[in-house]
Image (cartoon, grey):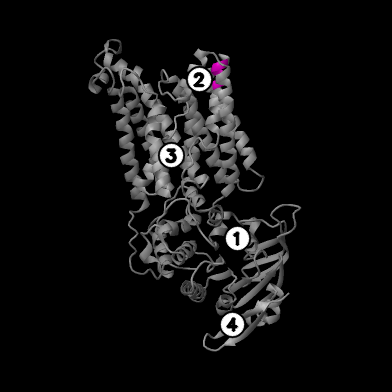
Amino acid sequence: MTTTSSVAAPVDSGLRPIRVRLALILLGYGAVALAACLLAPLVGTTSISLARAFDRSIPFADNLDAQIFFLARLPRVLAGAVVGAALAAAGVVLQALLRNPLATPFTLGVSAGAALGAMLAISAGAAVGIGALSPVPLASLTGAFVAAAIVYTLATKPGRPMSTAVLLLAGVTLNSFFSALILFVQYMSDFAEAYRTVRWLMGDLDVGGVAPIAAVLPLVVLAFALFAVLPSSLNLLSVGADTAATRGVDVARTQRIAFFGATLATSAAVALAGPIGFVGIVVPHLVRLMTGVDHRITLPASALFGAAFLVGCDLVARTVLAPVEVPVGVVTAMIGGPFFLWLLVRKA
Amino acid sequence: MVLQVRQVSFSYEAGNGFSLRDVSLTVERGALTGLLGPNGCGKTTLLKLMAGVLWPEQGTIAFAGRRLTDIARRELARHVAVVPQETHPAFDYRVIEMVLMGRHPHLGAFALEGPDDLAIAHDALAATGTAHLAARAYMSLSGGEKQRVVIASALAQQPEVLLLDEPTASLDLAYQLEVAALLSRLNRERGVTIVLATHDLNLAASICGTLVLVREGRVLAQGATEAVLNGDTIRELYDVDAEVRFHDRSGHLTVVPIGRVR
């Protein structure tokens, strides 16, 4: 069949070509993320100058601005950028996989598994680490992978696409179950341990250096490599699994890549900084409001904006009640809770 | 023939009875074939099998002489497109985005659509009378507009075969006629082979050259519409007494149901 011959009057689709939009959005959102990462370390109880921090003529040992910038604040900002990008991208992918705009990276029980692992490690005073991975992040990753394996096994039948209904229900059930176990572990802990567990559950980007970030970075890089093949298939998957199949999408394979990519990104983010809520839902929705819903745009844009968003939230967390620090998870929840409700009302 | 279904059996859950049993049918190139049968008889299942969404437990399905199992999904999607009964995207895509998704099987994994793809999408919008809706949000459209946009998206695949599952089920009379005219035109002017599952006997009688009648997962009869559509086959198919007669003004057979047969 040939159909190009009889093109009628020009169609006004109200959209620029995808290549132009993608380039503009990567530039724009990339600039925002970069600006956030460069400017956030300048703000804090001690004010420093960017020019002085990068002044190579002053020896590092004598350059207080450089020490504060590179040693105290930059690792924290980088952690925020990595975690924000990972959670926001995982949110976009899971919302398409589950065909549910209200899904979050924590919907599938991965974060609850991670939290239980971390709680057990804290309570048991675990001391076993692998390389740069200290015991708590390692236990958290293990918990996340166990949770993901349970949910995946329940939702998959050989040769068939995943059941997104089972995926969702298993995730929600596992979240509740693990939450109960977390409470039990906390109940059995002494006061000091219980405080540490509660503090961990609030999320914290003060990771103490670049080594912990480097330890989980390979997982995040792998997750993004998986995400890179997904966007046009996610568009079709979000329209319907059968429609996707008849447009040439290998549905089962796409679902597997989406699930594993989102699991890797979420577990790495939670292992690094604890479960910081709402980033994975607020950012994708804000980005959709600004750029439309095409996943070829929203996925990279959400990753970049997620980085900037969490760095910004952490800046608020560090400074709003200075010298007291507010847990960053509380700041994201303060923004995310009302935003989530607004989304629900808007949908209704 | 372009599609051949040979002795196909299929069940959704092993050991729980067959949804389709020993079904054979052929779809000739350029034909407009109606698939008729009561609710749950296996029409949708048969369409999904022909589209390669489901795989038969027994028997084979071939497109242009090649088994579907030997054709990559992306390649099959360049030849066979499907219009489901209803399409509910999870996100509010614009109409042009919905239609451009039809270009997916023609693009590489990392390729973005270019001017040629856009021209094909615009042509599909024009062919379905939806060009003026291109910038609109899909979810803001009426049922008839949505169905035409989904047909446009399927046309953007540039398929040789279009499979439609009850495309007029939720439409009012005017939209039913509009979609019927559109399908007839696509078949006549563009040579698209069409298989149409429907409950609307008069729609089938008006545009389908051949019919396949399915009951309880088996093919009851198939052949030219005039040969297959009569009071006896309708009684056997639906347990309904109906009068089938040629209608002069419309120029095709019409079916008037009289009552249920116990």
Chief secondary structure of the magenta span?
A: helix
- Indicate left or right for A151 with A23 as reference: right
Q: Nearer the viewer, mark 3 or mark 1?
A: 3
For label 4, the crowd category at 10 Å Cα-Cα, with few meaning under 14, some 14 to 19 and many 20 or more, is: many
Instruction: Tell me the amino acid under the disc marked 2.
Output: Thr
For label 3, the crowd category at 10 Å Cα-Cα, with few meaning under 14, some 14 to 19 and many 20 or more, is: many
Mark 2 lies on a secondary structure that is helix
**On the image, numbered disc 3 is attached to which residue?**
A281
Instruction: Tell me the amino acid under the disc marked 1.
Output: Ala
Which region of the structure is painted magenta? A119-123
Residue at 40% from the left image edge and 39% from the top image edge: A282
Q: Are marks 1 and 4 in contact (CB under 8 Å)?
A: no
Numbered mark located on residue B51 in the image: 1
Q: Quadrant of residue B199?
A: bottom right
Q: Nearer the viewer, mark 3 or mark 2?
A: 2
For label 2, the crowd category at 10 Å Cα-Cα, with few meaning under 14, some 14 to 19 and many 20 or more, is: many
Asked whether the viewer can see residue A128, the reply is: no
